[in-house]
Amino acid sequence: MKPAYLNLAESGELAARAADAWRHLEDCDLCARYCHMNRLRTIKGAVCRTGERALVHGHGPHHGEEDVLRGRNGSGTIFFSWCNLRCVYCQNWEISQKGVGREIEPEGLAAMMLELQAMGCHNINFVTPSHVVAQIIAAVDIAADKGLELPLVYNTGGYDSLEALHLLDGIIDIYMPDIKYGDSGQARQFAHVRNYVEVNRAAIREMHRQVGDLVTDENGVALRGLLVRHLVLPENISGTESILEFLTEEISADTCLNLMDQYRPCYRANENPPLDRRITSREFSRARARAEQLGLHRFA
């Protein structure tokens, strides 16, 4: 299956899309915070603290992702610094909250993609990309012209604007959003964002409209489609049942879901009980049983 963005590159639409996305930085609506700042001039007051250059913490083959992404040779991850969420329990808080990383031009991002392809990675995996959509599209345009031909993974916390997703239509092959919360009040308290549920569900509907259910090759490696992550939190803070019902009723019972049990207290979790403890085996078993009861059957 040919990656979607190659068709846009051949027609010249990818370059036009990159220019359009760059203009959005002047009155930014490229994540669901809708700060409307001119990020080409200043980052003062912007939650993402990112201007016209993306900050990258690191890149390389990642063998810790879902089996459908890592395959035998790893997923070619590019970890972006900063984040448009402020989760109090973030496991990568040094990257997401402190912005540890280095600024890089689109040409540098394109070189990273081509390097990961040369290393045999199965895909290019953009981690925490919501605030750098314009920079990513510009880099993909450059990389495609130089021979990039791997599927692109949009690995997001799920607080994405429809404006950004419309720009990515036909560019991204695999969407991998988190669904962190089934209640916007909990999201406000623990991730410091408004209307998370409404934003997240609108985004996932759009992602699924673009790419459909997950499709894999003969070796079980993802080629195109939607893969959803949900981290079960203590005392059902995450609203798991509501999320599972949304997926089955409004997306697809064939949605590929990674229902995660690896929560551990990090960052400021100890200040926010009950996030100061791991989940129990019983809490996770209930979540898994409910998913199966609702008809979800593709687990990553």
Image (cartoon, rainbow, N blue to C red):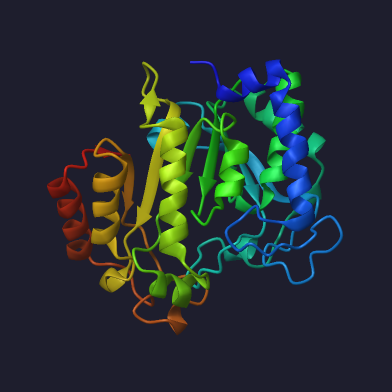
**Image coords of residue 281 (percent x, y):** 21, 62
**Image coords of residue 259 (percent x, y):** 31, 50
Which of the two residues, 94 or 1, is positioned nearer the viewer here?
1
Residue 185 visible in this rendered orientation of the protein? yes
Which of the two residues, 114 or 172, is positioned nearer the viewer here?
172
**Image coords of residue 4 (percent x, y):** 56, 23
Specify the farthest residue to the right: 41
Q: Quadrant of residue 47?
A: bottom right
Q: Is residue 273 left or right of residue 36?
A: left
Total of numbered circles in the picture? Answer: 0
Specify the farthest residue to the left: 293
Q: Is residue 46 left or right of residue 183?
A: right
Q: Quadrant of residue 117?
A: top right
- For the point 40% across and 60% down, the residue is 180
- Quadrant for the C terminus in the image: top left
**Image coords of residue 164 (percent x, y):** 61, 46
| Image vertical order of residue 214 relative to residue 37, above or below | above
| Image vertical order of residue 11 relative to residue 15, above or below | above
Which of the two residues, 9 or 297, is positioned nearer the viewer here?
9
- For the point 79% across and 70% down, the residue is 44
Residue 77 visible in this rendered orientation of the protein? no
Q: Is residue 238 left or right of residue 125?
A: left
Which of the two residues, 163 or 39, is positioned nearer the viewer here?
163
